[in-house]
Image (cartoon, rainbow, N blue to C red):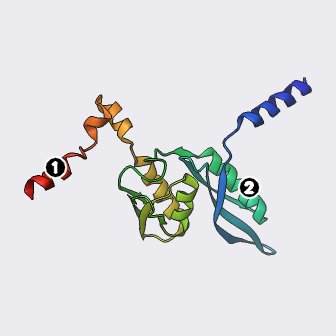
């Protein structure tokens, strides 16, 4: 029986193909005052993603740094979200995300722009696989709140395909016509 369980475990490991990259965003030494003095521990904030449209974050606390990072990574893998990317490199539209006093603004960008974002937001975009984005964080500079606000905004993002499906239309009906703009400019000239 034990042999069969071992084979199942190995098969599950092989099926877990998507390899996740992780980024340590913040590590914080925390203390607890007890009768004999202070006990120190560590809190870690980690962002995990497959760089193909999935991202998650987690936090972990432990007496040692590696254990805190491991706990945070496990939690991040359990809380992953999927985000549809335009051309696999940027967002479909501009988004605002909020969490507490933290507010972030994320804008899609043309190819070659790169990731213009500060600390914790940059980690989220890199793990998500976004290559071109312009963003700004307003309000809280706490990394926990910034990451939560970024994730909140990313969950609000909708692809034209999902909007068209919800409305019962075609994608071409929803997207603006690109040929009409140059024709109108020629007519004025």
Q: Is residue 68 left or right of residue 182?
A: right
* 112 up-or-down from 184: above or below: below
Q: Which mark identifies residue 57?
A: none
Secondary structure at numbered mark 1: helix
* Number of numbered discs visible in the structure rendering: 2
The residue labelled by disc 1 is 183
Residue farthest to the bottom? 37
Q: Is residue 50 visible?
A: yes
Residue at the image position 52 percent from the left and 69 percent from the top: 142
Left-right relation of 57 to 189: right
* Left or right of 37 in this view: 141: left
Q: Secondary structure at mark 2?
A: helix
The percent coordinates of residue 6 (x first, y second) are 86, 31
Look at 35% across and 31% down and name the residue there. Answer: 165
Q: Residues within 10 Å of mark 1 (few under 14, many from 20)?
A: few
Q: Nearer the viewer, residue 73 or 102?
A: 73
Towards the viewer: 122 or 131 = 131
- Image location (x, y in percent) of residue 71: 71, 54
Q: Which residue is mark 2?
A: 70
Task: Report whether 103 appears left or right of 124.
Answer: left
Q: Quadrant of the N terminus?
A: top right
Q: Of marks 1 and 2, which one's residue comes earlier in the chain?
A: 2
Residue at image location 67% in from the left, 68% down from the top:
27
Label 2 neighbourhood size at 10 Å, few (<14), some (14-19), many (20+)? some
Q: Height in image: 38 above or below 14?
A: below
Q: Quadrant of the C terminus?
A: bottom left
From the top left corner, tell me how far across and down residue 158 is, in percent. Answer: 39, 44
Q: Where residue 161 appears, x then y in whole percent?
A: 37, 36
Residue sitting farthest toward the left:
188
């Amino acid at each position: 029986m034990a042999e069969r369980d071992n084979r199942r475990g190995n098969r599950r490991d092989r099926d877990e193909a998507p390899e996740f990259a992780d980024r340590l965003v913040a590590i914080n030494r925390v203390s607890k005052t007890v009768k004999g003095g202070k006990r120190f521990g560590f809190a870690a904030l980690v962002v995990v993603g497959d760089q193909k449209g999935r991202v998650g974050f987690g936090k972990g606390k432990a007496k040692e740094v590696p254990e805190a990072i491991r706990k945070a990574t496990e939690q991040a893998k359990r809380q992953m979200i999927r985000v549809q990317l335009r051309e696999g490199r940027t967002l479909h539209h501009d988004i605002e995300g909020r969490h507490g006093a933290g507010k972030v603004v994320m804008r899609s960008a043309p190819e070659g722009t790169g990731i213009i974002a500060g600390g914790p937001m940059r980690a989220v975009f890199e793990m998500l696989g976004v290559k071109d984005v312009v963003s700004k964080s307003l309000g809280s500079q706490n990394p926990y709140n910034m990451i939560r606000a970024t994730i909140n905004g990313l969950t609000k993002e909708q692809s034209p395909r999902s909007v068209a499906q919800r409305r019962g239309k075609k994608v071409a009906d929803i997207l603006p016509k690109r040929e009409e703009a140059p024709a109108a400019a020629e007519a004025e000239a």
